Amino acid sequence: MMILYHCISARSFRPLWALEELGLPYELKMLPFPPRALAREYLAVNPLGTVPALFDGALCMTESAAICQYLASRFGKGNLDVAQDDPDYGRYLNWLHLGEATLTFPQTLVLRYGRFEPQDRKQPQVVEDYSRWFLARLRAVDAVVARQDFLCAQRFTAADISVGYALMLADYLGMAERFSEAVLRYWQRLQQRDGFQRALAAQEKAALAQGVSPVPAPLADPAA
């Protein structure tokens, strides 16, 4: 059985969502956020102290988009991945990695300098600049989902999980009200998926059972 180390609604939600979409058995190990500071023992599992960490036997993977690609290609049976001979294969890979490299990156700066740093180190200009940076990059998503339900191959794929998580994080950060109509409808479609709802329920159940706060870090009181 695979083991996934996870923080509530962190990047590790991507592989959790993929596991639920595929109906694969897994063990979910919950950590407080950030684990490198609040669960130092986790450094023996992942020296970076970041989530996710997915173990499949002796294999350990720590990049959320790569894990989604791995799960989809190895266990998806065509359900979440796109075949190499499919005309949309390149688009699939591009969206899969854009979700993390282009869309999630600026939000980490918004989180850090708008939420996690002490008051005297917060940087409102950084927060605004990188919020705009993120929203500007959503134009690429808007151009596609304005005319089709999903990003590629005319169906839901791991690319939608990758980009969908970036929208999830943006929603937590209060940016959903700045989404275009097409992107907002796309995000609403993703949230209605059974796999997404099962992933939400799984993380909350595991957090409560393992003594971890079920509140996503962006919504938690930083003074608590």
Image: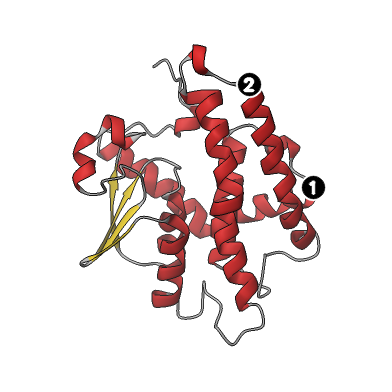
Q: Secondary structure at mark 2?
A: helix
Q: Residues within 10 Å of mark 1 (few under 14, many from 20)?
A: few
Give the quadrant of the N terminus.
bottom left
- Residue ID at (50%, 13%): 119
**For the residues carrying marks 1 and 2, which lies nearer the camera in this image?**
2
Q: Mark 1 = which residue? A: 181
Dots 1, 2 in contact, CB < 8 A: no
Type of the residue with mark 1:
Glu
Q: Residue 10 falls in which quadrant of the image?
A: top left
Residue 223 in the image, given as x and y percentages of width and height: 42, 15
Q: Is residue 142 left or right of residue 123?
A: right
- Residue ID at (74%, 42%): 179
- Residue ID at (54%, 53%): 100
- Residue 147 vertical position relative to residue 113 in the rendered view, above or below: below
Q: Which mark is residue 124?
A: 2
Q: Is residue 33 left or right of residue 89?
A: left
Q: Can residue 32 be seen here?
A: yes
| Closer to the camera in the image, 108 or 174 | 108
Q: Is residue 126 left or right of residue 220?
A: right
Type of the residue with mark 2:
Pro
